[in-house]
Image (cartoon, rainbow, N blue to C red):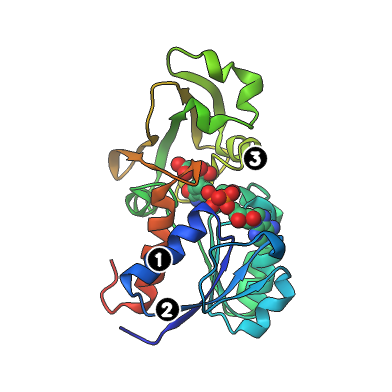
Amino acid sequence: MSASERIALVGAGAIGGQVARLLRERGTPVEIVAVGVSDATRTRSVPASAVVIDDPAALAATGATLVVEAAGRASVEPWGTAALEMGADFAVSSTSAFVDDALLARMLALADTHDARILIPPGALGGIDALSAAARMAMTQVTHIVTKPAAAWASTEAEALCDLHSLTAPFTFFQGSARDAADRFPKNANVAVISSLAAMGLDRTRIALVADPGAQHNTHKIVAEGDFGRMAVEIENHPLPDNPKSSAMTALNLVRLIENRVQRLVI
Ligand SMILES: NC(=O)C1=CN([C@@H]2O[C@H](COP(=O)(O)OP(=O)(O)OC[C@H]3O[C@@H](n4cnc5c(N)ncnc54)[C@H](O)[C@@H]3O)[C@@H](O)[C@H]2O)C=CC1
Ligand SMILES: O=C([O-])CC(=O)C(=O)O
């Protein structure tokens, strides 16, 4: 193992809480030095080593070397800016923020100035390694189908597009670009930005969003074609107990990212 990493978690909800639990249970040699929240008075399950901060300006004093966001789209700009300005790497879960090209460009410029990196883990997805590698040669198409139990689409625009309670079969309520999907469904379709930034971009990657009344899992199917050949990857994720919208894999991929920074064998 290499030197320990000082981590600030932004958001300690279903994903952030699971990340902290797994790191503790697995004895990963990292220290969670801070937890960033939007409302310090409603915070629970914070690791003993962490200070709770509700102002991104307080990040600098924590000495964090890696800031891990799992809080929501609105948190990305303020916490990401503060992280990059202090030279810490910034790992993003709420990738829907990057439907705003100007925001991504501003944050990349900051990363450049402060010699830091923006890290986009695969989130709820599998196969992003192959998709990203494939895109080093010409790609002709990427299609990503997101299927979740009908209840996982509650309190989103899906409610206006179909009657989630009376569905008797899978219903595709959205087909369009990754940019539009992530912009309109920021709590459910951050993955659309991941599969699109990995290869064909936000406007040429086709997304379908499906509510399935019989589903138990959050399923992602990515089909891609290009000069490399063809790939079809399907992953059936258990939702996290604390938030049915979010897949457990999202937390697991963050733990993998963190452990890869402190282990000698990177995989
Ligand atoms: N990349 C991916 O594949 C996925 C990304 N996500 C993203 O991760 C986010 C978090 O997911 P969950 O943990 O399931 O949600 P959650 O609702 O269980 O937890 C979010 C936590 O962040 C806190 N929070 C909200 N706004 C904040 C802010 N501005 N600053 C600091 N803390 C703030 C909340 O108080 C809450 O504790 C989602 O909103 C979504 O944007 C979720 C699932 C998959
Ligand atoms: O967790 C998932 O399966 C995907 C998700 O919510 C997102 O991308 O926002």
Cα separation between marks 2 and 1:
12 Å
* Sequence-earlier tag: 2 or 1: 2
* Sequence-earlier tag: 1 or 3: 3
Relative to 140, is 163 above or below?
A: above
- Closer to the eye: label 2 or 1: 2
Q: Around disc 2, counting alpha carbons within 10 Å, would you say few (fewer than 14), some (14 to 19), or many (20 or more)?
A: some
Q: Around disc 1, counting alpha carbons within 10 Å, would you say few (fewer than 14), some (14 to 19), or many (20 or more)?
A: some
Label drawn at residue 257 = 1
* Sequence-earlier tag: 2 or 3: 2
Label drawn at residue 183 = 3
Is disc 2 in contact with disc 1, using a CB cutoff of under 8 Å?
A: no
Q: Secondary structure at mark 3?
A: helix
Instruction: Pinpoint residue 215: horizontal percent, then vertical percent.
Output: 38, 27
Q: Secondary structure at mark 2?
A: strand
Is disc 2 in contact with disc 3, using a CB cutoff of under 8 Å?
A: no
- Looking at mark 1, is its residue's CB closer than 8 Å to ligand 1? no
What count of labels does the image hold?
A: 3
- The amino acid type, in three-letter code, at marker 1 is Leu
Instruction: Pinpoint residue 117: horizontal percent, then vertical percent.
Output: 54, 71
